[in-house]
Image (cartoon, rainbow, N blue to C red):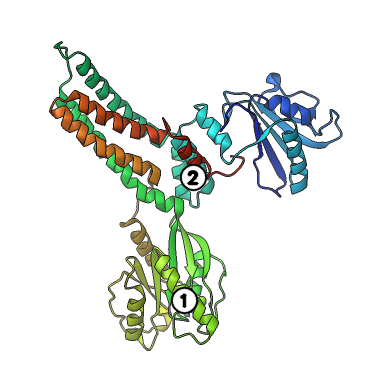
């Protein structure tokens, strides 16, 4: 990607009340000057001040009113000179202004290209740039918090510290290789070995945060399944907080799968309500039930709902076991407890919640079970860092090289120790964006939207 020319994009979603056109690059002032005219001219004297003017391709004040601000590099988001034009929203007005910007010589920015420039210009490292995308796509407070921490440099600092320690050890190895004859004041190899193992432990911890990262970034797919009329759609509505699905007393109300996003205990959830599973009464219901089965297979967690007031509880349980036998994560939910009377419910081999959607009992206990199923343990602390799968793979590379390096230090093989240390240092460097190949960068930045 060319990083020397001047790029531009409409940074706000189309159709809003105000639209922002961002222009970044060496020509940004000249390009903006061709279409925006105010009483005060954009330039160093007015840097970082909002100026009122008009957008019109001709040098007159007949056009639409628009605000403009000039942010000279290197103290701008991209590190380049930036001009932002804040103009009327609406699809057509902003399109016309943007076309004028392009006609004046700016190139259409690729997705994520502003952030890519910030990375190339050293305004942020790769972990911080990745977190900008995480921030935009965050679906829960916790995901947002993690993205903000990463933008602030939490992961970068962790990686850079470890990398700097390894570089110290490497330089001593290299000196030992260069000055084999001299009996210089060398650091005891055991001290380095100890350091390397401490770094391994830190990296292991960082890697463990990857599970949280994947869940918080991608969310978790949960299916509401069970026989007809057990209250699946009622629970969906309760979890969403609004009446999304039709609920009736007729078994077979839901005929197709219905997917919505919810936020349960700060965990983003793709929640799918399904058609109740039974012998289908017609073709359409049959197709719906096929979809229910498929959704159960594809989900990471099954909420299997049972009617606590059912007259056929043992058959209902057998039916459940038939459908979730292959699934590792199942929570059984006895619903309609308000109708069930006092007769005891059988113990199940799955974690079980007892609820009534109608009178809203047991919902908190269900959420506790959900949280345990997701994190594997009750989650009390907010995580501070959660690495992505890209980071985790590079941490694995580091972890593979470090014990080898330690073993070579132990046998005073400085040359081989240096080889393994360099591999570990390179893997850590790839996390923060040193020597990362262009196709990997392209892959990372293609996740962004245009204008970021
Ligand atoms: N008494 C009582 N009724 C409930 C409860 N939960 C749901 N119902 C009722 O049970 C009926 C069926 O609820 P739905 O949510 O449509 O059940 P479903 O599992 O989605 O049913 P299908 O879409 O047919 O598979 C409705 O009349 C609900 O009002 C509950 O906790 N207690
Ligand atoms: Mg339903």
Residue that extends furthest to the bottom in the rendered view of this protein = 311
Tag of residue 11? none
Where residue 407 sits: x, y (%)? 16, 32
Depth order, front residue of 59/170: 170
Residue bearing the label numbered 1: 290
Q: Secondary structure at mark 2?
A: helix
- Position of 412 compared to 242: left or right? left
- Left or right of 56, for residue 279: left
Q: The N terminus is located in which quarter?
A: top right
Going from the N terminus, do you reach mark 2 or mark 1 first?
A: 2
Q: Nearer the viewer, residue 421 or 261?
A: 421
Answer yes or no: is residue 151 visible. no
Residue located 19% across and 32% down the image: 406
Q: Is residue 160 above or below residue 321?
A: above
Q: Give the residue at mark 2.
A: 134
Observer able to see residue 114: yes
Q: Is mark 2 within 8 Å of ligand 2?
A: no
């Amino acid at each position: 990607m060319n990083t020397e020319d001047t790029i531009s994009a409409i940074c706000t979603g189309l159709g809003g009340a105000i639209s922002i056109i961002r222009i970044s690059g060496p020509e940004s002032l000249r390009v903006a000057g061709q279409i925006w005219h105010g009483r005060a001219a954009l330039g160093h004297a007015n840097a970082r001040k909002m100026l009122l003017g008009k957008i019109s391709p001709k040098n007159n004040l007949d056009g639409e009113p628009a605000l403009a601000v000039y942010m000279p590099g290197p103290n701008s988001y991209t590190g380049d000179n930036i001009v932002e034009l804040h103009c009327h929203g609406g699809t057509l007005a902003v399109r016309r202004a943007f076309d004028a910007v392009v006609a004046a010589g700016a190139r259409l920015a690729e997705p994520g290209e502003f952030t890519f420039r910030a990375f190339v210009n050293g305004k942020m490292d790769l972990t911080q740039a990745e977190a900008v995308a995480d921030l935009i796509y965050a679906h829960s407070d916790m995901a947002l918090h993690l993205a903000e921490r990463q933008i602030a440099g939490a992961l970068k600092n962790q990686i850079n510290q470890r990398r700097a320690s390894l570089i110290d050890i490497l330089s001593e190895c290299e000196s030992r290789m260069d000055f084999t004859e001299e009996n210089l004041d060398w650091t005891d190899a055991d001290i380095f070995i100890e350091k390397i193992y401490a770094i391994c432990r830190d990296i292991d911890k960082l890697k463990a945060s990857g599970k949280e990262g994947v869940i918080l970034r991608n969310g978790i797919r949960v299916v509401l399944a069970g026989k007809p009329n057990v209250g699946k759609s009622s629970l969906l509505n309760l979890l969403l907080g609004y009446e999304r699905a039709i609920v009736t007393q007729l078994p077979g109300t839901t005929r197709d799968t219905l997917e919505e996003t919810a936020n349960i205990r700060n965990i983003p959830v793709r929640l799918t309500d399904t058609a109740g599973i039974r012998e289908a009464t017609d073709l359409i219901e049959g197709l719906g039930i096929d979809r229910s089965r498929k959704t159960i297979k594809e989900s990471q967690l099954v909420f299997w709902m049972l009617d606590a007031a059912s007259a056929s509880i043992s058959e209902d349980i057998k039916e459940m076991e038939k459908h979730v036998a292959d699934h590792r994560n199942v929570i059984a939910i006895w619903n309609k407890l308000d109708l069930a009377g006092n007769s005891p419910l059988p113990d199940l081999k799955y974690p079980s919640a007892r609820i009534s959607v109608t009178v809203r009992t047991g919902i908190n206990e269900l959420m506790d079970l959900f949280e345990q199923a997701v994190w594997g343990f009750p989650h009390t602390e907010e995580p501070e860092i959660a690495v992505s799968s890209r980071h985790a793979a590079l941490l694995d590379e580091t972890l593979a090289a470090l014990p080898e390096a330690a073993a070579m230090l132990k046998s005073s093989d400085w040359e081989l120790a240096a080889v393994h240390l360099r591999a570990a240092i390179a893997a850590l460097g790839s996390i923060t964006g040193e020597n990362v190949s262009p196709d990997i960068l392209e892959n990372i930045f293609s996740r962004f939207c245009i204008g970021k």
